[in-house]
Image: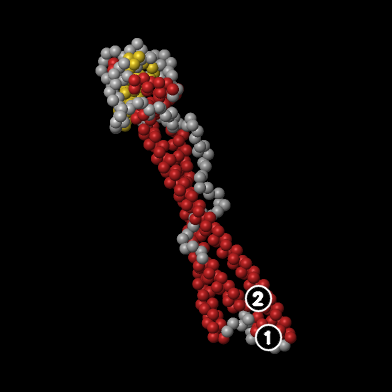
């Protein structure tokens, strides 16, 4: 009886091939492991410190957003490639099925022909030896092929698991970077946008201690009955609290609050003008004075609700809590000081 090694190998491998490939998840994966793709790509200079300006934050956020999106695109391309490789492997498995089924059918009809039966069917000693050698070669080939197939299956499975995990990380990273970018954009809009600050403003401001509120949680009207430390006049308790918090935050240049005569809040002790200079008032004329004004304005706007601020005027713009920034064209263009009015 002649035994063909190819059919013996098919018989041994077919069930393993079928089970192993059926165990591979159907969904595709993402990028090749070890290809240099990172879930948190670093484009250089992406980290920002405590003294970062909003320009730094926007630069970092936008660069990291683009890098994260690029990583996901790369992973998606690799994912398609791996899906095609899995499809080819499944095609090879399907091509084996008819022959495997035929062998299984013959086994059902005639019974399994084991090694003992194969060798006992020898015609003579030479035939027995030839069959024994043939059987050993078949078994050795089968063992090598099985080991090779198992390694390939393990490789595909481990790659797929790693790549699926990577694409999930990258998609999560993309969402995080998008949120970071949106947060930075909102922060920039809060302090007047690029046109007002030119990026010369810290990304974060110190948090002011909250001003006292009434039992309803609001700010009740207050009289001008506290000595103004900047003039011989008076201010409200809320204005004095704001004044001390601004000074505590490090804004120690010239300031004037109470002013006799005129409309609005100064005569009522509910406003202060924060100069950019150590003495007197002069328009912003360099990066230092402009940055000082920007950072002071940003501190007031970011802490407006905590301090009870009514509005802020800076560099031809006015900010109200209810409506944000608007163009301002009053008697002063406020390029030499930051004005703050209190509730």
Measuring from the top left, give residue 289's x and y in whole percent: 43, 21
Q: Nearer the viewer, residue 198 or 11?
A: 11
Q: Which of 108 and 194 is in front in this view?
A: 108
Q: Can residue 278 be seen in this view?
A: yes
Q: Going by the picture, which residue comes out furthest to the bottom?
A: 123
Mark 1: secondary structure:
helix
Q: Going by the picture, which residue comes out furthest to the front?
A: 215
Checking the image for residue 150, the label placed there is none
Mark 2: secondary structure:
helix
Q: Label 1 near label 2: C-beta < 8 Å?
A: no
Q: What residue is shown at x 32% (from left), y 23% (from top)?
A: 341
- Location of the N terminus by quadrant is bottom right
Measuring from the top left, give residue 133's x and y in whole percent: 70, 78
Measuring from the top left, give residue 181's x and y in whole percent: 42, 40
In the image, taking residue 257 as reference, residue 39 lies left or right, namely right
Above or below, 225 relative to 138: above
Q: Nearer the viewer, residue 144 or 16?
A: 16
Residue identifier under label 1: 120
Query: Which of the two labelled residues, at mark 2 and mark 1, occupies the earlier sequence position?
Result: 1
Label 2: few (<14), some or many (≥20) within 10 Å? Answer: some
Which color scheme does this rendered protein use? Answer: secondary structure
**Marks 2, 1: nearer the viewer:** 1
- Location of the C terminus by quadrant is top left
Above or below, 235 relative to 181: above
Q: Nearer the viewer, residue 68 or 228?
A: 228
- Image quadrant assignment for residue 157: bottom right
Residue identifier under label 2: 138
């Amino acid at each position: 009886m002649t035994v063909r090694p190819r059919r013996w190998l098919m018989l041994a491998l077919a069930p393993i091939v079928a089970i192993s490939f059926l165990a591979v998840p159907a969904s595709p994966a993402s990028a090749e492991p070890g290809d240099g793709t990172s879930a948190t790509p670093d484009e250089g200079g992406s980290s920002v410190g405590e003294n970062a300006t909003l320009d730094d934050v926007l630069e970092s956020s936008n660069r990291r957003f683009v890098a994260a999106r690029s990583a996901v695109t790369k992973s998606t391309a690799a994912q398609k490639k791996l899906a095609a490789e899995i499809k080819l492997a499944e095609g090879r498995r399907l091509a084996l099925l008819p022959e495997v089924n035929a062998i299984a059918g013959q086994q059902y009809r005639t019974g399994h022909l084991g090694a003992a039966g194969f060798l006992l069917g020898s015609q003579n000693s030479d035939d027995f030896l030839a069959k024994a050698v043939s059987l050993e070669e078949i078994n050795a080939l089968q063992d090598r092929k099985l080991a090779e197939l198992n390694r390939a299956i393990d490789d595909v499975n481990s790659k797929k698991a790693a790549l699926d995990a990577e694409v999930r990380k990258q998609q999560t990273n993309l969402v995080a970077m998008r949120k970071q970018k949106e947060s930075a954009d909102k922060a920039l809009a809060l302090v007047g946008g690029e046109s007002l600050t030119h990026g010369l403003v810290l990304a974060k401001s110190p948090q002011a201690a909250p001003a006292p509120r009434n039992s309803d949680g609001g700010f009740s009207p207050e009289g001008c009955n506290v000595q103004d430390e900047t003039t011989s006049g008076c201010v409200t308790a809320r204005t004095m609290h704001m004044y001390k918090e601004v000074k505590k935050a490090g804004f120690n240049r010239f300031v004037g609050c109470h002013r006799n005569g005129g409309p609005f809040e100064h005569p009522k002790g509910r406003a202060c003008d924060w100069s950019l200079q150590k003495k007197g008032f002069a328009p912003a004329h360099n990066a230092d004075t402009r940055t000082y004004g920007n950072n002071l304005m940003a501190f007031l706007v970011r802490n407006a609700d905590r301090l009870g601020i009514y509005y802020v005027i800076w560099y031809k713009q006015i900010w109200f809590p209810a409506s944000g920034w608007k163009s301002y064209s009053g008697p002063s263009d406020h390029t030499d000081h930051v004005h703050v009015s209190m509730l």
